[in-house]
Amino acid sequence: MEPGGYDFTYFDTDMVKFVNDNNIKSPTINLITTNLKNRLTYVFKKGQNNQWELIYKWSCTVGKPSTPTITGTFYITGRKPYFGSDTYRVKYATRIRGSYYYHSILFNAEGTEIIDDRLGEALSHGCIRLAVENAQWIYDNVLDTTTVVIY
């Protein structure tokens, strides 16, 4: 689904106002948004009167121009403890859609040491990289079907 139907006026300046003014729904108690321009990921919890309350705001690394991060509204569909190749590994991967995930910064292939800890940049193949503890928080706490808005 394309990010149609939302008013993005406050997306870059006031994410709490954006999610509440647009009355964004999530089947779970959480909602996640990622701002690709500001390279920030926001985690919300359902609060009083069904208003979203911001509980976390994290710097993240997003897709580089040649392999951009997808935009739109998605729903979390599963997770895996890690994935990678013979040159790298990422941990705490939570699926946004298809091969797009929220996951940790890059480790070596064995998963024993960090090889790229840069955040706040456009470097990935399309996934959204987070600090290890933040990727783990999503992995451990955010349920499948949780709404994700990326723009």
Image (cartoon, rainbow, N blue to C red):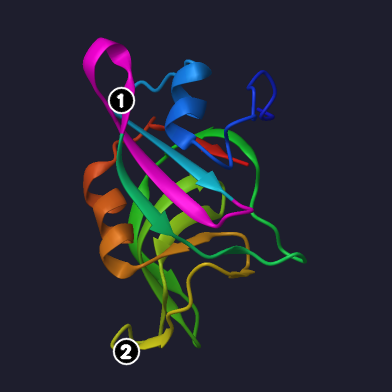
Q: Which mark is residue 47?
A: none
Q: Residue at x 22, y 44 (%)?
A: 141
Is 43 one of the magenta-colored residues? Answer: yes
Name the residue nearer the viewer: 30 or 96: 30
Q: Residue at x 24, y 22 (%)?
A: 47
* Residue type highlighted by circle 2: Glu
Q: Residue at x 68, y 67 (%)?
A: 64
Q: Position of residue 117 (x, y in %)?
A: 42, 80
Quarter location, residue 136: bottom left
Q: Is residue 104 above or below residue 111?
A: above
Q: Is residue 43 above or below residue 111?
A: above
Q: Position of residue 100 (x, y in %)?
A: 55, 53
Q: Position of residue 6 (x, y in %)?
A: 63, 22
Disc 1 residue crowd, few under 14, some 14–19, many 20+, Cα 10 Å: some
Disc 2 residue crowd, few under 14, some 14–19, many 20+, Cα 10 Å: few
Is residue 96 left or right of 31 when viewed as pictured? right
Q: Is residue 113 above or below residue 76?
A: below
* Residue type highlighted by circle 1: Thr
Quarter location, residue 9: top right
Q: What span is colored magenta in the figure? A: 36-53
Q: Residue at x 47, y 62 (%)?
A: 60
Residue at mark 1 to residue at mark 2: CA–CA distance: 34 Å
Q: Position of residue 1 (x, y in %)?
A: 65, 27
Residue under label 2: 113
Residue under label 1: 28
Regarding mark 2 in the picture, which secondary structure is present there?
loop
Looking at the image, the residue that sits furthest to the right is 66
Name the residue nearer the viewer: 92 or 134: 134
Dot 1 or dot 2, earlier in sequence? 1
Name the residue nearer the viewer: 5 or 14: 14
Q: Quadrant of the C terminus?
A: top right
Is 73 one of the magenta-colored residues? Answer: no
